[in-house]
Image (cartoon, rainbow, N blue to C red):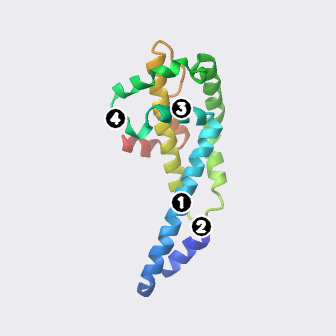
Amino acid sequence: MNALDLIQTKIITTTQLSKKCDEVNDLITSLKQELIEHQYELLLKDSDLSIHQQLITLIFPIDQIETDDDYAMYASLIENKLFGKEKLQEIETKLHEFLPVALIETQQSLFKISSPTIANDIITESSLKFLNLYNVFYKILQEIYPEDHLLKWTTYDVATLLGVEEVYKDSL
């Protein structure tokens, strides 16, 4: 990616190479999307939410949720042992261990990317995708356990820990 970024910066001003510049830009964009997805998968794995994400998506795709009434579709998850209170407490503990250092670990994993803009885009996009899942997970738990507050951190708290609170606030 660094080589492609360097090539792009060298040929961007040459009009005869504009087609090649577009091709390089497409390659960079494709690689960046792969890294965003990879970073998102790491966030899921490190937070122990990957299987929960799969179950949630299996019932109803996260990106198709439009109203708070849509969360009622997830009520059946209370019967799944992965959504039992004991397992959810384990996840809460894991989140409290993982999220305070997540931003630092993410930055370190992207340290070799020479473009700060690309690295920032990867961090921001993967974090926002994770926040979207966390927000759905948080609301599902409120739906199936209305009397309990199993997750102590709100979505905004997690956004702050991931260093994207301003971008998250702007996306609302």
Q: Say which of 126 and 60 sits in front.
A: 60
Q: CA distance from mark 3 to mark 4?
A: 19 Å
Nearer the camera: disc 4 or disc 2 = 4
* For marks 3 and 4 on the same chain, the one whose residue lies earlier in the sequence: 3
Q: Quadrant of residue 171?
A: top left
Residue annotated with mark 3: 55
Left or right placement of residue 40 versus residue 18 in this view: right
Mark 4 lies on residue: 66
Q: Amino acid at mark 1?
A: Lys
Q: Quadrant of residue 151?
A: top right
Residue nearer the viewer, 79 or 126: 79
Kindly indicate whether the residue at mark 1 contacts the one at mark 2 (C-beta within 8 angstroms): yes
Real-space Cα separation, disc 2 to disc 3, in angstroms: 34 Å
Which of discs 4 and 1 lies nearer the camera? The answer is: 4
Query: Which residue is rendered at x = 64% and y = 35% of the image?
Result: 98
> Picture quarter containing residue 87?
top right
What is the C-alpha distance between the residues marked 1 and 3?
27 Å
- Residue type at numbered disc 3: Leu
Image quarter where the C terminus lies is top left
The residue singled out by tag 2 in the image is: 1
Whether label 4 touches label 1, CB < 8 Å: no
Gap in Å between the C-alphas at discs 4 and 1? Answer: 28 Å
Drawn side of residue 70 relative to residue 136, left or right: left
Element on which disc 2 rests: loop
Measured in 3D between alpha carbons, the distance from the residue under mark 4 to the one under mark 2, in whole angstroms, is 36 Å
- Residue pointed to by mark 1: 32
Mark 4 neighbour density, 10 Å: few (under 14) some (14–19) many (20 or more):
few
Measuring 48% from the left and 44% from the top, which residue is drawn there?
Answer: 128
